[in-house]
Image (cartoon, rainbow, N blue to C red):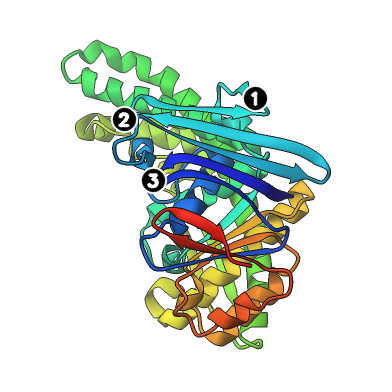
Amino acid sequence: MRIQRVRLENFRNIADLDINLGCGMNVLFGDNAQGKTNFLESVYFCATGRSHRTGRDRDLLKIGANAARAKVFVDDEGFDDNIGVEIDKMGKKMWVNGLLIKRLGELFGHLLCVIFSPEDLSLVKAGPGLRRRFMDMELCQLYPAYYHNLRMYYKIMKQRNNLLRDITSKPALIDTLEVWDEQLATYGMAIIAARAAFIERLSRIANQNQGEITGGLESLEIIYKNNVDSELFLEKLTKARNFDITRKSTSVGIHKDDMEFRINGRDGRIFASQGQQRTAALSVKLAQITLIEEERGKMPVLLLDDLLSELDASRQKFLMERTRGLQSIITLTGAESAFDNYLNQEGAKIFRVEKGEIMCYN
């Protein structure tokens, strides 16, 4: 799978762009705040329907513009796909091969991406929300049905929370909670099963990566910290009703889940050095690529956003060796010590980015 062409209009600071990408390494270089990350964001948005930087779609509009548009043309092993998006102040619309999609789940799989930014290096020590998002986005790409279960879970939880707030003034409504609890448990149990299986496979592959990067000096185990056991989901919801009514929100469920990274058997968030935490994050991201290849039978597009400046030479080398053969889009400022090496990579296509304009350099 590779991206052939990208067209953008009024996307962040990019007013008008139409470029063809190389099938291997694509290097975007330029000073900070010129548009390199905006370009990666547009590609990721077309793949997932979401930005990796903001939860507000309207943030993607160029200042003063009424709408932003992005279109990515994909070669999927000889089959041509194109994905388009239009964003305005009212929301977004997305198309696959010219057909308007009604649900975001219809988008997943047409462009498989793994994005790696400096923020991802904090995966081990960051808050649980970032780790849940990591799980969910990867699972949505692997299994489009997972997105349906996730969407239904949060839709039902929102309705349940509204009901919890109304019960204070209308106590008779408490009898209707059972219906919402049963539905929430049904979707929650499916999500728990998917997350548990995913983390088990991810842990195995990431541990192999950790050992290779560190020369066998470190092991990595990823533990799924589910908030509630699947078979006890409905029971725990029922027992928590009075507490939830008091708090006016749902206290039990997959929205409280987390992951724990154990490096050499110890909680990496507490005991690992920054270098060990970064190695673990790199191991996990590379495991994503392996999982996509194993499950979908295709290699994803790799998006590296200003990452190389955050990695030492040995980790840079490992990353480049392990991702050889993938189409990659890499952003650099030009100040990195390895900058010249990447410019001189055989077959690399180089682009200079300046004030929202992206120009082929070689």
Q: Which residue is mark 2?
A: 241
For the C terminus, the image quarter is bottom right
| Marks 3 and 2 close (CB-CB < 8 Å) | no
| Marks 1 and 2 close (CB-CB < 8 Å) | no
Q: 157 or 170: nearer the eye?
A: 157
Q: Nearer the viewer, mark 1 or mark 2?
A: 1
Say which residue appears at 35% left-offset and 41% top-offset. 62
Residues at marks 1 and 3, CA–CA distance in whole angstroms: 23 Å
Q: Is residue 323 above or below residue 38?
A: below
Badge 3 or badge 2: first in the primary sequence = 3
Determine which of the numbered discs, if any, sits on residue 98 in the image. Answer: 1
Q: Is residue 294 above or below residue 85?
A: below
Dot 2: element = helix
Residue type, numbered disc 2: Arg
Residues at marks 1 and 2, CA–CA distance in whole angstroms: 47 Å
Say which residue appears at 67% left-offset and 81% top-offset. 212
Residue type, numbered disc 1: Gly
Q: Position of residue 134 (x, y in %)?
A: 50, 53
Q: Residue 321 appears in which quarter of the rendering?
A: bottom right
Badge 1 or badge 2: first in the primary sequence = 1
Residues at marks 3 and 2, CA–CA distance in whole angstroms: 45 Å
